[in-house]
Amino acid sequence: MIARVPSAAALQYRLCAAPAYRISDTSKVSARSWASLANPASSSVPAPNSAAPTPKPFDAIPSVPRVPLLGSAIEFGKLEPKDTGKKFHHVVKKLAAKYGPIVRLRMPGYDRDAVLVTDPDMVADVHRNEGPFPKRPGVLTWLHMRERRQVPLGVVFENGHEWKKLRLAVQAPISQPKNVNAHFPAINTATVQAMTNLEQGLREAGPQTLAGKDPFVMEDLVMRWTIEAVSEVILGQRLGALDAHPNPLARDMVRTVNAMGETTGPVVMLPTFIWRNQLTRTAREHFTAMEEMMDVTRTLMDTTLTECARDPAKLQGTFLGHVLQRDTSITRADLLSTTVDLLIAGIDTTSRTLLNAMNLLGRYPSVQRKLRDEIVRVVGENPNVAVDAAHLAQFKYLKNVIMETTRVCAVFPINMRFLAQDAVVGGYAVPRDTEMMLGMEAIAHNDKFFADPDTFDPDRWDRGGIHPFAHLPFGFGPRMCVGRRIAETEMAMFLTHLLRRFEIRPSPAPDDVVFNIVLATATPMPLRYRPLNGATAAV
Ligand code: HEM
């Protein structure tokens, strides 16, 4: 049966005035959280449009050539000859330019076609047909590793009822406001420590760096800060990732998250038998990194649980505590896989978005000034004043800055879904279970959907007129990012502290961005800082 779904163009394009974000009853995830500016007003499906034209057949969708084993990789390589896997976001844009906004292709290792869409109306068509248990394909190498180790797939890769069970277990502790707000003091303290580390780092790097003339490499510090914040929420304790001699487990985590990021793109472009048998160095490094991430998390979890057996109060309000106290259906193995998922999904995404935000704020001094003015108005000038939930609720421009950062510099170039039912997508009949690739980054950079798309213009989110499915940085529907509230809180907290202590000096745009699970700069993000007058002394 074809579900006739009217074009999303029929929806009202509303931004800030949108009523509470409503998702299917199967998910109790966040009501519209404070940074959710561009979420569609509702995910409910409008009444079918009986006047819709008969859909064109699936086979009429433009198709990318493919060969056995390699799928469409040869055509991908022609479009983007160098580092094709690492530049898959460019491939997506070039496919859209060559074949149009809907195209069939085959990923290496797959025996079925996927459909790539790069039009917000079609993204809406897909989400309206994702069903109450939205299904997303996994990364084949990650699935293989978990199957080999006989551990469950975890909340990111599980599907169906098993996913729902894990999702419900995760959701309350990490997305309900009262639970996230409970971690504010610890995240605040970690952020102050990160600011102290930054100032010390600038001093140690020399007067040119302290004066904001030479760049400062910030990746490691931001990543360690994110680990500190996420581990507070998940494990109920700070790891000491920001200490002068960081906890070795935190160091291992930075290393393995980076290695997983760097190796996934190239390895998934290889024929399956090559990575399965680990015939290349990158494939070997990839599997080693995944194994290590699992081992580090197991050690952390075991240590936490042993400590908490002695002092159960420690786990109060944390993800682990919540699951252990209330949910007997979650096994220890489920807990391990899902904790790995939360750490992987929560570290690189947030730290990359912050690095992007800082580079953009340096390049757009008037935006930075306007943001600092708002921060000082809401929290005050004294950098020692802690930031709390009431402050965050008052920010308006900060929300726009984060939203615009995720648009200009997305961390995920594509999102994925399987259709839950036969559907009409972009006027074509697409059968259920078809794998749909949503080219969100290509849409965000298309001047058809965003005026002057390369310009960092946070005010555009107040002007309205943006298609509600044109920018979904945290995804959409019951399967949208479960860590959104934590991510928003962390980023707001970090920028609020940073801009009260430092000026971000102008730097060039990063010249090379690669697909390392998330989009990341190939070399350190160009960033320069200068402490504001006397602001740092009292930390
Ligand atoms: C700026 C930061 C972040 C961005 C841009 C981001 C973005 C996303 C996106 C686009 C998805 C896919 C949603 C969909 O399929 O509709 C996702 C899923 C997910 N994210 Fe995030 N995320 C961020 C931070 C976090 C954090 C901090 C955590 C956890 C602490 C987290 C945990 C997850 C998990 C577990 C999923 C899978 C949810 C599921 O399949 O049910 N994310 N994220």
Image (tube, helix red, strand yellow):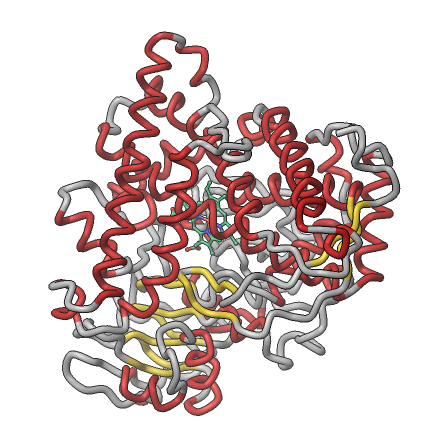
Say if residue 26 shows up in the picture.
Answer: no
Residue 111 at x, y percent in the picture: 17, 74
Relative depth, front residue between 34 and 291 = 291
Q: Residue at x 60, y 69 (%)?
A: 510
Q: Is residue 338 above or below residue 366?
A: above
Q: Residue at x 67, y 45 (%)?
A: 204
Q: Quadrant of residue 278?
A: bottom left
Q: Residue at x 19, y 51 (%)?
A: 145
Give the residue at the far top of this rendering. Answer: 310
Relative depth, front residue between 48 and 475 = 475
Q: Quadrant of the C terminus?
A: top right
Q: Is residue 526 above or below residue 496?
A: below
Q: Residue at x 60, y 55 (%)?
A: 217
- In this rendering, would 106 be left or right of 62? left
- In this rendering, would 394 be left or right of 474? right
- In this rendering, would 281 be left or right of 7? left
- In this rendering, would 322 be left or right of 119? left
Relative depth, front residue between 226 and 13 = 226
Residue 523 at x, y percent in the picture: 52, 66
Q: Quadrant of the N terminus?
A: bottom left
Say if residue 443 shows up in the picture.
Answer: yes
Relative depth, front residue between 303 and 130 = 303
